[in-house]
Image (cartoon, rainbow, N blue to C red):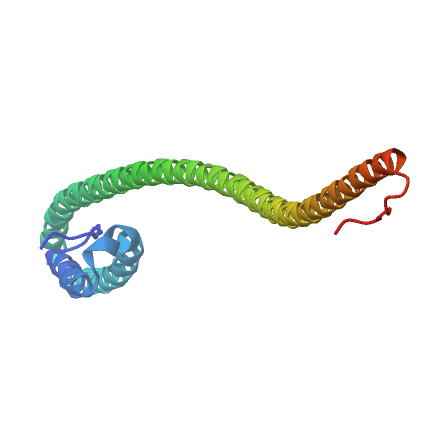
Amino acid sequence: MSSLFTPVEGSLWSQNIIWDHADEIEDEIPEEVESEVASEVASEVASEVASEVAEESGRSSCSRTSSRGSRRKSEESEKSVRGHSRRSHEEALKKEKKSEAFFEEELTKKEKANDALIEDLKKEEKANKSLREALTKEEKANKSLREALTKEEKANNSLREDLKKEKKAHAFFKEALEKQKRSKATLNDALEQERKQKHALEKSLKKMQVEMDLMKTEVADLKKSPNKTFHTGVT
């Protein structure tokens, strides 16, 4: 397992302590937060290791006979620690780059998703606009239809009024014809009565004419024969 910690100078024993502590800590830290806590944990571990190295250095200084060997061992340990520190730093940089690449990729995906969402929203907005236009047209058509129905209703009402007037006029004309028929019948009766009266008058005039003719004859006869009896009236 790669480490996030930067070792400090010290012996191989101190180096082993660093990696032991690093392994224990790294096992508990999630990978996504390693780059954020690396410096803080490294500082704490370095402090602990530094105190241990100081104690070992104190013990090694008590032995004068092994001072040169300890010095050489310390130099080798420092070289090893520095090399491992460089490798750890490189590993940390690689992880950081990977994290950056991951975040950039996620950001790109999110931007693409947002762009797709924006496009969907635009399409939905266009669809809603078309729907509103269609509803507006339908509303106008319904308004025109309502106006046409209103006009038709007015025309029907006017037609009904005209039919009522025509019906009244027809009834009036029918009544006038009935009156005319009754008047004509009355006139015919009057004419018939007048004809009868005229016929009776003509008959009476004829009778009077006969009587007058008879009287004239008798008067003439009397003039011719004075002793003849005079008769008046028609027998």
Residue 149 % position (x, y): 49, 43
Q: Is residue 216 left or right of residue 4?
A: right
77 or 30, nearer to the observer: 30
Based on the displayed image, in which of its 4 quarters is residue 16 positioned? bottom left
Q: Is residue 154 left or right of residue 98?
A: right
Residue 216 % position (x, y): 83, 36
37 or 227, nearer to the observer: 227
73 or 2, nearer to the observer: 2
Residue 71 % position (x, y): 14, 51
Q: Residue at x 39, y 37 (%)?
A: 134
Q: Is residue 171 left or right of residue 20?
A: right
95 or 172, nearer to the observer: 172
Placement of the N terminus among the 4 image quadrants: bottom left
Residue 73 % position (x, y): 10, 52
> Is the residue 28 above or below the residue 168 in the image?
below
Q: How many marks?
A: 0
> Is the residue 115 above or below the residue 55 in the image?
above
Based on the displayed image, in which of its 4 quarters is residue 64 positioned? bottom left
